[in-house]
Structure formats: structure tokens, C-alpha cells
Image (tube, rainbow, N blue to C red):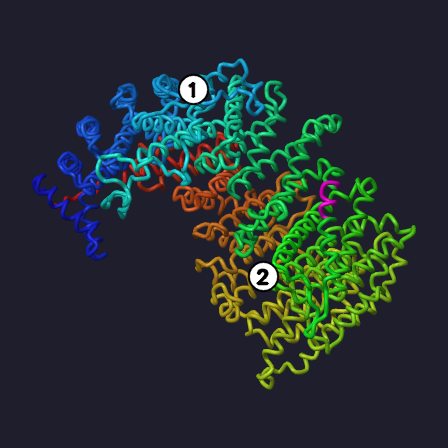
Amino acid sequence: MASEEASLRALESLMTEFFHSCTTNERKREIEELLNNFAQQIGAWRYCLYFLSNTRNEYVMMYSLTVFENLVNKMWLGVASQDKMEIRSCLPKLLLSEHKALPYFIRNKLCKVIVDIGRQDWPMFYHDFFTNTLQLIQSPAMAPLGLILLKTTSEELACPREDLSVARKDELRKLLLEQVPTVLGLLTGILETIWDKHSVTATTPPPSPTSGDSGELLGSLLQGTVYSKLLSQPIPQLDQESLQLCSLALECLAHLFSWIPLSTSITPSLLATIFHFARFGCDLRVGAGLKSKLGPSIYSSSSSSSSPNGGSAGGPGAPPPSCPVNGSTAQAPGGGRADRARLGVLAMTCVNELMSKNCVPLDFEEYLLRMFQQTFFLLQKLTRENNAHTVKSRLQELDEGYVEKFTDFLRLFVSVHLRRIESNAQFPVVEFLALLFKYTFHQPTHEGYFACLDIWTIFLDYLTTKIKSRLADRDSVLNRYKDALVLLLREVLNRIQFRYNQAQLEELDDDTLDDDQQTEWQRYLRQSLEVVAKVMELLPSHAFSTLFPVLQENLDVYLGLQQFIGTTGTGRRLNITAENDCRRLHCALRDLSSLLQAVGRLAEYFIGDVFAARFNDALTVVERLVEVTCYGSQISLYDLETAVPSVLKPDLIDVHAQSLAALQAYSHWLAQFYSEVQRQNQARFINLITSAMDASAPLISAKVPEKLLLSACHLMVSIATTVRPVFLVTVPAVQNIFNLITDSLARRLPPEAQVLVCRALSNMLLLPWPNLPESEQQWQTRSTSHASLLAALTRNYRQLRASANLQQRRVGLDDMKAELHQTLRVLRDIVDSISGEATKSRQICYQSLQESVQVSLTLFPIFIHQPDVTDEMLSFFLTLFQGLRVQMGVPFTEQIIQTFLNMFTREQLAASILQEGSAGCRVVEKFLKILQVVVQEPGQAFKPFLPSIISLCMEQVYPIVAERSSPDVKAEMFELLYQILHHNWRYFFKTSVLASVQKGVSEEPMENEAQFIAAMQAFGQSFLQPDIHIFKQNLSYLESLNSKHKLYHKKMFRTTMLLHFINVLLQVLVHRSHDLLQDEIALAVYNMASVDFEGFYSAFMPEFLNGCQGVDTNQRTVLGRNFKMERDLPSFTQSVHRLVNDLRYYRLCNGSLPPGTVKL
């Protein structure tokens, strides 16, 4: 090696070159390789120590620290003890002498390296590691540095990564827990001292929180307690240094609270102190003008800066681009305010860490109560109104991060602790809800409001569950909360109406879809209506009497539009033109649309046991909805010309569509009404259904806007499927729709609407009528009608057979395809909708379909090379097999399967599968799904197909997909294999009950052994591949076969495969390739090992350890000794995870220190 000085100069120039904008990627790779090789040398650390002491180049410093980090974490075992002592002595000295001059990210990195050494050597070889940190914290000048070291220690030692053995992890946690009381005491001391020191000099105290200027709600909580006095003290003005020290102390506390258990070490004085600092967040003079979310402090000691901008860990390091690069911590003007607000955020983070723990020891419950009391003092402060500020403007001026943390606190309180605290006489829950109400409805942002609605939803769920479990005192519980619920309902309803909340609602986006396929407006409305529905469940009559009059009011506006319709030369026009009137109409229509959705959402609370009690309310709603839908269809508002067509036309269409959707929501109520009046006066019911059909029928036309058309179709489907009135087919409006759909000259509806209307018409004829005996079902007439309906629907499709010779028909191919797609989609839907119905319905359906099915089978070979068509055909056949296989009968089913097996030759399969992610793959997947249905069929009918299905699976499909990384087709193929094994176990293991009783064991004779072995090998092979979904699916299949058929106990599996499977699964755990499935893999290993624990411990484990590369004999012995010979699942799983962790750790230790030296 060259001299240290020359090496330093060389390194500086290399680093400057590396980060220069003109350096090519090729040259960067060369430099990186050189630097990596230098770092791997024995003794490189001495140079790095010299570099750190003698350079001001940040890149060089970062690189040198990365070398140390690599040495400590990956090569420490091989470092001579004398060298270790020198490193342990030099690095802390360097930190102490230079920490003020170093850029903060270099200082943090140096702290992390020192903590990493402590992680390896404390307390045995580095006994003063922790005491040094504690001493620094107690020294005023060094306290910030001590706190950075403490937080880094908490991060790196309490939850270490895998580069330590399990025994060492446990030891470190125990050592840290012993230090917790001391550490918490020191942190409390720092915070209290700073608070007390500055409180003395604070001037101009604010008004006392108990001065009755706004009728304090929670005064009773705090009266006479030491907290009322403490919390009413003015907030001190802290200097910059104190702010930074408090920030660091609170950051340490937040991290400590994330892992230490709740215990009396967390003293009342510590909690009180944290709450003092939480007040910084809600003091307006602190946070005034702050709108940005505050980022991490520049003092943050997170180890995320451990290898910025460098390639690998050994590569060159660079400081984060936007950071100050000198050691200074200069603040932007007003930064003091930002830091003060940040104290509030950090204090609330500490509180929330404690709140999120569900397991509360008995002796900590009193502390919790104190915490709630103190937090609600803050909530009072946040929601107090005075002359200077409304609640909303106060929340608006606070730091956004603080409000978020506070909302998190409220959510944790309601979801985790309310059940503990509610019965405590010292805690006024109703007053708390009043504060939460104010806090919710004064949120300055939509996200904040959504988060608060979530809290109310959790509370309403809690209340509903509580009432269901305590029906006896239901009324007393409800009465306690009734006022709060009434207020909540009214306010949420107001918030969804433009009439009361126009400014906010107009900000919501109603165009862009989010991940849940809804717009911001739809999400807002849906979350609000969920709250309304939950209140309805608790207070049905009250909720109804609140909502219905508001709906009525808006309906009157809508129903009054008729008088403003006039006729012009071009058509009918809505004569409302004044801008103000148009705006008011727009708002009224938007509100009506929302309220109709609300009424529809409440439909479920009128049925079942409460049908009779709430009958009149529901009847009022349904009659009103029928009236509105008929009105909309009669005067066809969607067709009107308006003054502002881009706004009012969509509004009118939306109201009409929502009224149909709301009526559809009451279809279950109509069904119950029908069954109640079956033998009585049906006039009222018949009138409702007839009117509903009169409202829907005119809309079923290709000329009607699609949104409206689909709403009408869905309403018709619901009445035909859910209500099923006997007289439905005879209603004139329905007759008109039959004529429209069966008329070959009529213009076709859009595809989705066509499918829905055909489903409705088919269901009217196929579904059994409720409450009528079989003799009155008129099956004969209905069967004839259904046959003629389907004959009309498939007229063109059935003619394709005659003209199907493609050679002569090249011209009309696209037309044929379109006909095929449209017809098969309709037929598939018809079959699907009756697949779960009575046998008679399915028989009639199949009779009507028979000819079309034959046509499809004839056309299939002709279209085999057109994957989009084959896909549609196979979807149809799959639906047939799932719904009508009994009706099709064995001979015809055999014919279909044979046709498919003949068509799907190996070449055809390969051609389809190799078009990755295409229609070809989907075709093969559908084909495999059909075979899944076939192999699941009980009885002997389809057993003759098993050999050819297994052969297709293992000899034709499997070889094509086995080596491909793409998951296409694999999932379906393995499911088919599983279904073959599960439903046809006796195809492989012939057994009789008598034989197994006589032998006393279940060693059955085996048949078709080669096919069984091939299937198992395919499963085993899949565990060696990276696809995690296939891995998870196949592991669950093996476990299922074991639980249902004792797979792992079968002699064939036990003697030739069991150990191979265990070996593969353990190797997967060691390689961490499927980490998300750790628990599932460990469980499978346990189930396999439990077949023969003796053999597992005595034969498999020694063999497995001997085969492990990268560990020495001594380490193998330790691994074997630590794997306890336990037979219960928790202990066994723990041993497996320990084995995996320690094996990886030993390999890491042994795999370092390559030979060779490199000069810079």
C-alpha cells in the first residue's frame, strides 16, 4: 500500500471524479469496483481512520465510514482482538472531538458504526458502551450527541436485523430492558428541567382553561387535580438549543415506546411531561402560519443515511443532495416556530405509541385514564371557540401533522380503549363525544373529515355490538347516547347536501377514479351514508323521520319541473334560464340524487323481523319512489333541452337513474310484502309492480342514455329474480319488452343492457314462483314460452352452422365473430343465473338451449385457431358444465370432452400457451377449468376420462409451463392436479373399510403409481421457482391433501418423498426467497416432520446440517443442539426460525475476508 497521505489524495480525486457530471457509467463502475476491493482488504480500516481524521471531503468520510460499517457487520469475527480494541477506542474519540464540526449525516453515520460495534461486543468486550452514552446524556454540552446515540441504540439493538444469532438478539433485548428505567428517568429529567427552567421566565399567561368563558365540558375531570393546574400554565418560550434537545428526547421516547412493554417505569411524571409538550401543537402562537407537514428534524439519527447514493454498501457514499453540508444547523427564518410545532407532533407520536398497545397490565390502567384526561384537555383546547378564532380556523392554522396525530389518537382511543374506559365513572363519555363531534365537523381538510368519520364508524360498530350482547338494558344504553347520535345523523346529512355545504362539496373531484374505482365525491358520499345507515340501525324511527322530510322537500322541486316544460321547433325545452335559478336547480338535483342513495342504503332496515313494525314507513318510501320513477319516464326529462346542458342534463339523468336504483334496493322488501299478501288483497302490490314496470319499459331502448338504460335493466332483473310475481309476464309493459327483444328487425341494445334484459325475461319464465305448490307453477306453458324466447334470441347464431365453412366465408368472418360473441354472452349469463336453482328450472333451460349447444360444439373446431372466439366458447361451455352438467347427460358430456381432448393437441396447447398473457393462455385456462369440474363429479360416469385428463395435464401441459417463469396456466393446471388427487383418491389408493380395520393400519395397495409420483414431483418442482402465488397455492394443496387423505402418512410419500419436501422447504426459508410465507412453510414442515418425529430428529436433521454449505463442524453442532426436540407446534416453529436465522448468521460471518490487496 502507498503512504496514507498519498492514498488520501488518490481517494479524494477518485471520489470527485465519481460524482462529476461528465464521468461515464463505465468509469463509475471501474471506480466502484476498485473501492469495493480496497474495502475488502485486511487493514483497510487503518487507512480509513486516517482519512476520517485528515479530510474535509464528505464523500471520502462517507466512504470511510461505509468501510467500517462493512467491517463491523460482516467481518468482525475475523478481526484481531487488538485491532478491535483500537477501533473501539478511536472511533468514539473521533466522535467526541469532531461531532460539532462534522456534517450531521456524517455524525449520524459515525454514531451508527459505534452502535454496531456495541451490538456485537457489549457488554463482554465493550463494557462501557452503554454507560458512555448515559454519561453523555447527563453532560449538558454533550446531551444532544448522547441522545442521538441512544436513539440509534434503540433502533439497532432492540429490533436487530438478521445478522445476529437468536441467542444474541435475546441477550441484547434483555440487557436493554434492564436499562429502560434509568433511560426513562434521564429523559424525563431533561424534559422537566427545560420546561421548568423556561416556565419561570414565561410572560403574559393566557386565560386559565377553567375560566368559564366557554362552559368547559371536561372541567369535572381535571378540577382539583394537579393536572388542571399544570396544564393551565403558559407554554414557555424555548430557545433553539432547548428546542433541539427536547426534540431529540421525544424522538428517543417515541422509539423506546414502540418496543418496551407498558409498565410502571413509564411514570406519571413522564406522562405529564409528554402532555406538556403536546400542548406546543395546539398553541396558535406556536404554529401560526404553518401549513407544511414538517419533515424529519435535521437532528434525526435514523440510520437511513447509511449508504446514500452509493451503489453497494462498499461503494462510494454521498451526502443527501439537499442537506446542509457544513456542520451548521442554521434555521430558515421562522424555523423556531416550526420546531415548536414539531415538539407537539413528537409528543403526540409518543402518546400514540403507548395508545396502540392493546395489552394493558392492570397496574397501568390508572395511567391510561390519566392519559385520556390529559389528551381531552387538549381536545377541549382545540375545539374551544373564542372571539378571535372559530374552531375551524383554529384547526386550519395548526400544523397539519399535529392534527393528523391527534386524529390518530382519537381513533386508537375509540378502537382500542373505549371498552375499558367507558364504564369508569371518572370518564364522561358523552362529553367526550360532544368534543369529538366539534372536532369532526370543523376539520379543515377532506382527508381529516374522512378520518373522523372512520372514528364514528368504529364507535357505532362498538355500540351496535354492545347492544346486541346486552339486549336487556338496550334502552338505557341507547338513551345515554341518543342525543349524540341524533346530532351526528343530522350533521352528516347536512354535509352531503349542496344546500348546506356547497363550497366544500364543489371542491370534490367527481371524474378521477381511485384504486377502489370510485371518485372522491363517491367516496365522500359512500362514507357518509355508511354512518347514516349505522345510526338507522340503532335509531330506526328517528333516522327515518329525519331523512324522509328532507327527501320530500327536494322531490317537490323535481316533481314541479313539469310546469316549466315547453315545446320549441326542435323539441321540448325546460324553461328555466336565469343563472341563479339554474344554479339552485343544479344544487337541488344533486341533493336529491344523494338523498335517493341514502334512502336506498336504508332498505335493509325495513325487512326481516321488523317488516311489520316498519311497514308503513317502507310503503310510504316505495310508493313515493314508484311515483318519481314513473314521472321521470313519462315526461322523459333526459330528453329535454336545457339552458346549461353540460350541467343540468347529467343532473336530470342522474336523479332518474338514482330513483330507479333506490327502488331496486327495496326489491327484498317487495318480495317480503308479496309473501305476506299472497292470499289477501293484492291490489296494492300489483299496482306497485305494474307501475315499476311502466317506469322501466320506456327506458329499454338503444336511444336512452346508457346510465339510465342500465338502471332500468337492473330494476327489472331484481323484480324478476328477487320478487318473482306470478303475474309479471302478463304486465303489458313486460310484453312490450318481450316483443322488442325477440323482434329480429329491432335495433340491438348495448351489450351489457342486452344481457341484463335477456336475463330478466328468462328468469321470469324459469324461476319458481314463491309460495306456490309445484302443481300451480304452470311449467308446461312457461317451458314453451322459454323455448320460443331462446329460439328468437339464437336465430342468427343457429344459422351460422350452415355457413360455417370459413374457406368460403372469409368476407363475413367479423360479422360471424360479432354474432357469436353477443349470443354466447347472453346464453352464458342465462345459464349462470339459474345454476343454483331447482332441477325443473335447469331442465327447461337446457331444453331451450340444446340446439345452440350442438351448434357451438360444431363451430368449435372451425374456430380453434381464433383464440378470442375459442375463449368465448369455452367460457360458455364452462358455465354449462358448472350449471347444467346433470341435465346434459353423460353421453353428450363425453362427446364434448372428447372433442376438446382431440382438439387440444400438444402443438395447439404450445401455440396457445406461448402467447404469454394472451387470449391463447386464457383459452387453455378455461379448458383446464372445465376439466376441474369434470374430475370433481362424484359417481363413476366420468371416471373413464381420468387417465387421458392426467396424461394431458402431466405429459402435454406441464412440460410446456414447467420451466416458464410466467404464472399463466400454471395456477389452473396445479388446481386441476389437486382436484384429481382430492376427488379421485381411490384411483391411486384402493382401500376397503374392512381391510383397514383388519390390518389396524392404513397401508393401502397403490395403483397408477407413476402418475401419482409425477404429480408429486410437479408440486415439488414448483417450490424451487420464484413465483410466490403458485408456491402458496401448492403448499396449501399439499396441506389440504394431508388433512383430508393423510398424504404425508402414505408409505409411498413417507419413504421416498417426505424428506425431500422438508429439505426443499427449509432451503427456501434459508434463502429467504419467499419470506412472506414463513409461517405457512414452518407449519408445513411441522406437519411433515410430525409423521415421524423420531426419524426427523435422529436421521433428517444431522443429514440436513451435514449438507449445509458455508458452516464449520462446531457451528453445525451448535445449530443441532439449539434445535430443541420438541413436538408441539409453537416450540417446533420457534426452533425452525432459530435454525434459519443462525444458519444465515454463521454463513455471513464465514463468508468474509477475501484475500488479496489493492493499491489506490
Distance between mark 2 and mark 1 Cα atoms = 65 Å
Q: 95 or 163, which lies in front?
A: 95
Label 1: few (<14), some or many (≥20) within 10 Å? some
Using the image, tell me which numbered label, if any, was put on residue 928. Answer: 2
Disc 2 residue type (three-letter): Leu
- The furthest residue to the right: 680
Q: 337 or 565, which lies in front?
A: 565
Count of picture labels: 2
- The furthest residue to the bottom: 808
Q: Residue at x 21, y 53 (%)?
A: 28
Disc 1 residue type (three-letter): Leu
Q: Is residue 251 left or right of residue 123?
A: right
Horizontal and vertical percent position of residue 384: 53, 29
Q: Which residues are magenta?
A: 545-551
Q: Residue at x 61, y 20 (%)?
A: 424
For mark 2, give the secondary structure.
Answer: helix
- The residue that disc 1 covers is 270
Horizontal and vertical percent position of residue 1108: 35, 41
Q: Is residue 687 left or right of residue 880?
A: right
